Image (spheres, coloured by chain):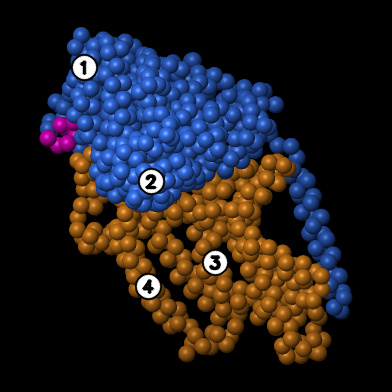
Amino acid sequence: MLKYFTSRILEAIPVFFIIVTAVFFMVRFVPGGPFDKERAVSEETLAALNSYYGLDEPLVVQYCSFLKNLARGDLGPSFKYAGWSVNEILREKALVSLELGGCALAIALVLGLGVGFAAAAFPSGKIGAALSGISLVGICLPAFVLGPVLILIFCLRLNCFNAMGWSDFPSDIVLPAFTLALFYAAWIARLSRSRAVEEKSRGYVRTAVAKGCGKGRVYFVHILRNAVEPVISYIGPAAAGLLSGSFVVETIFQIPGLGRFFISSALDNDYTMIMGCVMLYSVFIIAFNLLSDFLLAAVNPKIAKEMRK
Amino acid sequence: MAENFAERLKKAAVVAAAVFLCAACVSCAKRETPARKAAERGILLMGNAADPASLDPALSTGLSEFKILSGLFEGLVGADARTLRPIPAAAKSWKISSDGKKYTFYLDESAKWSDGSPVTAGDFVFAWKRVVNPKLGAEYASLMFPIKNARAINSGKLSDASLLGAKALSDYVLEVELEEPAPYFLSLLYHNVYFPVSQKNLEKFNAAQTRDSLWTRPQNMVCNGAFTLDYWSINEKVSVRKNPFYRGAKSVYLNGVDFLPISNINTEDRAFRAGQLHITDSIAPSRIDAVKRDSPATLRSDDWLGVYYYMFNTRKPPFDDSRVRRAFAMSIDRRLIIDSFLKAGQKSAHSFVPDNCDGYVLDDSRKIKYDIAAAQKLLAEAGYPGGKGFPKVRLTYNTSEQHKPIAEAVQQMWKKNLGVEVELYNLSWPAYLAARREGDFEIARSSWVGDFAAPESFLQNFESANGLNHTGFSDAKYDALLRAAALSKERAQRFENLAAAEALMLESAPIVPLYFYSRVYRISPMVENWTSNLLDYHDYKGVKLNPEAGK
């Protein structure tokens, strides 16, 4: 098992470097530069800026210097925010996104698994149909519609929460976390429902019932354990997306997280910030896929056995 | 067994729903809004469209930064909150030499930095030398070019910064020498690049020649304005609080201002409606009708020193022919665009400089007219009667919800009125700027907001050597008229030269002005003494908050 995970981590290193290298060169070929402004910048000023940020060096030299700094954990200064380093911005903003994404992930799991297994418990009744319908709505309802609707109801009509901001805890987290979670909850519900329905007709379930196991025990101990497998596979990349921040939700609720930097850094041609965002997301994707493999091995001994080979 | 299980699940669902309802009822009790709570504490909550990229006066370039910096720093000269006429600020008085090239400023000796040390003429000289230092790479250093040797130092042609035409004759007397007379020089002085910085403080943080310094952080920044920096978190908030060392602290009513960088206008509008803001930065045109109907008292539309226009690339056919350009400029119904998309009573633009900019007005007879018949005639004279044979051209604009419908409307007007096909081409902001800079366009959207309240802030953009002149328009007579205006001793003579230059440029029509900007926003009744002016410059010192007014 350890050998499997070690090999996966070793495989991830070149993948990470390919991503980083590709993005490093791609951003430099995008039209426009990081210091383009509506007001014309004099050639001398532009030269001074390029020299200060090392952009007057040949690309290969810039790349080597980037790798050298990366080895020291230094992602460099933000080109847009003078006086701020990318490390500092990522550290501060990633914490907000982690907090929001963590809550959204918890809501998505609780709501998704709850609805999914409840729907599977009544596969042919009205309750099951209603729950499946709810999960379908969750998939179809985009965050840019759900968020404003929730604000309209809970902030502007009922006056329960703030319409935006990130200062009043825990109330400021409720609506954005729910908005962010609903889509993922809906997918988890559908995945867990279909697998749970499938598992219910398996022989081991009939055997457990025949041996006198209570329905609740059969359902929550035997069926649930197997039915979470597709959810675990799904939740790996989903968690990376949730925890690294969402542009849409952070914009709707004015949350000072990392999600908006994924777009704004690209629009501003803030090269160092783009690299920081891409690297963070790559690390998240790799780490959560590994974690999801680890959890799959934990719930399914067959998978663990295959990993040991 | 199955029934029992189902029953248990149903009961659990009912209990969960009851708990949720109780929790909702408890939390839905009437809350006091954040705006009212802040008003009680004397804190103004302002929407600020963009996140400040820097709070260093030398490096800041945008209006969102200026809004904050104007509270933190005070230049030599302030601006009257209504008329924008220069008024004493850090300098209590000044003297201008008879040739208009030498200014002597006498500083207010009671002016202090927020660390209690005096604001001296040396701090101004240090700050200005820093701006023109080529190593700093200050994007707005060109605003200092009226000062003697500023351009030469900034371009590296002169390495001795002490030759800058700004000298501290004593701690409280500053002498500024200009390259040539600049009648608008006093108006320039309330731009943030002219703000002083504390030499002692910047040297402490090694910020004299570097962009990346920690001196602009709340715990480090030393200011001389009515407020000091209290909190700054990117994408979250900038808070400023009353500066007890400010010379006029007793007449400052506010205890602080929170600037919230809300980039999405719909988010900002919802925040205002939920009582989280006193003032928004703007409002979506689609909301204006509803606000006019439901709460008109909260809607404000102020004239703003900006113009929205299209520009032609005069280097390339078919727009190398001024008849074609004028035909395009004369066939747009600007009023229809304003009424259909902007909805806030903006003024249609038939000239480039907004009317009443420092009292300057261009006579109507010299402006571009809306005259379809004349436009069709001009196009026919240029060889394209009814648009026949006219090549397909592109209108380039940067991606935006606002630019697209305007571009579509103009496209239709040109098709209907002139019979020409124009293709719309949208680009991301950096790609659009690159296309403009490289002349890779036929028609491009553009806009300009004046840096200072004088017609020169607009008309200098079309001087032959100006870096903003992407149109290719170049006319020696135009350049000479602007120079003559600079040398004019009388205001009327100066304005006549400027008007002649503008008329000349409009006759050639390298641009199509569409409308003059208005600052359209919402303001809570709690805010008192909020004045408006063409530069959207606000003197927070006189603003008062009345929490009772919003009840």
* Label number found at residue B189: none
x then y, percent, for residue A66: 28, 59
- Whether residue B125 sits left or right of residue B31 in the image: it is left
x then y, percent, for residue B315: 24, 43
Q: Chain of mark 4?
A: A
Q: Judge whether B250 appears above or below B411 on screen.
A: above
The amino acid sitting under disc 3 is Ala
The span from disc 3 to disc 4 (Cα, nearest Å) is: 19 Å
Q: Which residue is mark 1?
A: B487
The amino acid sitting under disc 4 is Val
Find the magenta span and give its range: B151-157
Q: Which residue is mark 2?
A: B387
Q: Chain of mark 2?
A: B
Q: Which residue is mark 3?
A: A238
Q: Colour of chain A?
A: orange
Q: Which residue is mark 4?
A: A15
Q: Chain of mark 3?
A: A
| Badge 4 and badge 2 in a common chain | no
Residue A300 visible in the picture: yes
Crowding at mark 1 (Cα within 10 Å: few <14, some 14-19, many 20+): some
The span from disc 4 to disc 2 (Cα, nearest Å) is: 56 Å
